[in-house]
Amino acid sequence: MCSNTEVLAHIIEENLRYNDAITGALKHVKGTCGLAIILTAQPDRIFVARNSSPLVIGLGQDENMVAS
């Protein structure tokens, strides 16, 4: 299980100026987790990431799904 997702969200927020903010934040995670992230600056995009956990992305007509 992801160590603390609230802390992880703050790490991502603090590093948004870097292209690898999400990837860099996952380096601080102990354990497994799957994330779906929506940034207020880009509300039409969903960023997904995983750390040693399966992640499934489903693309459908008028809907998309993410599950871990």
Image (cartoon, rainbow, N blue to C red):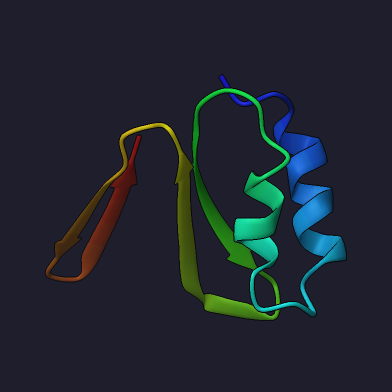
- The residue lying furthest to the top in this view is 1
Q: Residue at x 70, y 72 (%)?
A: 40
Residue 53, above or below 48: above
Residue 7 image position (x, y, % from top left): 82, 38
Q: Which residue is drawn at 74% across and 28% down?
A: 4
- Which quadrant is the C terminus positioned in? top left
Residue 51 image position (x, y, % from top left): 49, 38
Residue 48 image position (x, y, % from top left): 45, 56
Residue 58, above or below 59: above
Q: Is residue 13 left or right of residue 42?
A: right
- Which quadrant is the N terminus positioned in? top right
Q: In this view, does 48 lie to the left or right of 64?
A: right
Q: Is residue 34 left or right of residue 41?
A: left
Residue 22, above or below 19: above
Q: Which residue is drawn at 60% across and 58% down?
A: 23
Q: Is residue 34 left or right of residue 65?
A: right
Residue 38, above or below 25: below
Q: Of residues 42 and 68, which is closer to you in this image?
A: 68
Quadrant location of residue 59? bottom left
- The residue lying furthest to the front in this view is 27
Residue 53 image position (x, y, % from top left): 39, 32
Q: Of residues 31 and 16, which is closer to you in this image?
A: 31
Q: How many marks?
A: 0
Quadrant location of residue 67? top left
